[in-house]
Structure formats: structure tokens, C-alpha cells
Amino acid sequence: MKILAINGSPRGEKGFTDIVVTRFLLGAHKAGAETEKLYPAKMKIAACIGCLKCWFETPGICRHKDDMVEIYKLMQHADVFVFASPVYVDNMTSQMKKMFDRLISISEPFFEFEGDRSYHPKVVDRELKAVAISTCGFPEREHFEALSLTFRRICANMRARLLGEFYFPASSMLVSRPQKVEPQLSAVEKAGEELAQTGEISQETIAAANREYVEDYRAFCEEMNEFFHKVRRKRGLE
């Protein structure tokens, strides 16, 4: 099994999101999966300009000659995608969205119906699977709603079966209070292991990974505000 993790965080390995992604891949690797991780923010990816040259002049080839060529190749050989991004303005980061926009180059312009809705034709014949991971600074889980919907729609359009979503609010706790979040991270690691072993992730493991760990939203916000004031005072801004 080949698992390709795409972490859209502009902070890359230094971000909170990567803590979760790394644990998932660790579990998968221990169970024998081949894993790879990409950071679009570190790659040269031009924005799609909607010229449609990749459809009507040079089918399958984008006018931009950049790192997306390598991403196309890796995605075409992956069995499972891990789509990961911190929440930025209720959705994925601009770096990750730019990458998704460019996938138009490996699609076809034609419309076809499956069930009661239209799609572009499938790119590959094999079954694709996906996992979604996100972190957010706010403590409430409702901040993941828009991103969750986006990931679900992307997977539906790719005909990839979304096996599980793993969301970590109050993401600073991954560093400031790791002991509080360790049970959830252990469940994420187990999810990666289950996927590599069986091709599925149990609902029990998904529920364990998404179990609440923020005891008091207001207290957490007050604590974070005091931290922010402290940083500003230290820099002479207050």
C-alpha cells in the first residue's frame, strides 16, 4: 500500500498539523505501508489561470512547468491520500487550494452522470481511498465544518472513498499539553495501522481520535489571550 500525505500547512514540519500527520503515517509504516509526505508550501506551484490549455491544446499538460508535474506522478501511483491542512479562514490553506486547482490538468473536460449528479470522468480505474486531517486554534469543533465539507466534496469528485476524518481543535495543546492529547494521537496512530493492515479504519478508532479534550472553552480562550498579551508586552507592543 502506498500512502501519500499532503500537508498544506505553510509551516511544514514545524506546524501542529504535522504532529498529527506524522503519527498517522507512523502507524501505517509500522504495519508495512509505504509512506511519503509532501508540503505544497515548500514547492513551486503556480496558480491555475483557467486558460483550459490543458484540455483543448495540450491535453493533460499544464502550461505551467513547475513542481506539480512531480505531484501528478505521485498522486497517480498512490493508493491512499492523506489530505491535511490547518484551518485558515474556515477552510484549507491557500497553498493547498492552489494545488487542488491545478489538478484540472489531469482531468477531462467531459461530463458524465453517476447516480443523480454529474462529474468529470474518472482519472484512474482502481479504487482510491483518502483520510482527512486538520487542526485549528479555536477550541470548538464547529470550526472544522466548512473544511470537512470541502474535503468530502473533493473526495467525491475524485471518486475516492473518505475513510476517516481526524480533527484537533485548540491545536496549541498538541505542544503545550501533549499529555491531554496523547490518547487521541495514539488513536490516530492506530488508524494508520488499521488502514495498512485491513484497508479500512474502524468507527471506534475514529471516535477515539476525535474524542473531546478541551474541558472549558472559555477558560482555554482566556489562557490563550493572556499568552498573546504576554508576547505583545515582551515585544513592547502593549
Image (spheres, rainbow, N blue to C red):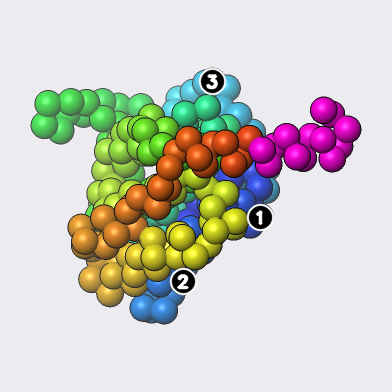
Query: Badge 1 is on which residue?
Result: 14
Query: Badge 2 is on which residue?
Result: 26
Main SS of residues in magenta:
helix
Residue 94 vs 162, above or below: the answer is above
SS type, badge 1: helix
Residue occupying the point 82% across, 28% down: 238
Position in image of residue 118 (x %, y %): 22, 26
Residue 51 bears which disc, if any?
3
Which of the two residues, 111 or 226, is positioned nearer the viewer here?
A: 226
Amino acid found under the numbered disc labelled 2? Leu
Position in image of residue 227 (x %, y %): 68, 41
Q: Where does the magenta region start and end?
A: 226-238
Whichever of labels 3 and 2 marks the residue nearer the N terminus, that label is: 2
Amino acid found under the numbered disc labelled 1? Lys
Residue lying farthest right? 236
Taking the magenta stretch, the answer to whether it contains residue 53 is no
Left or right of 115 in this view: 75: right
Position in image of residue 88 (x %, y %): 54, 32
Left or right of 191 in this view: 16: right
Position in image of residue 204 (x %, y %): 21, 61
Which of the two residues, 133 or 108, is positioned nearer the viewer here?
A: 133
Amino acid found under the numbered disc labelled 3? Cys
Discs 3/2, front: 2
Residue occupying the point 84% across, 40% down: 234
- Whole-angstrom CA distance, mark 3 to mark 2, is 40 Å
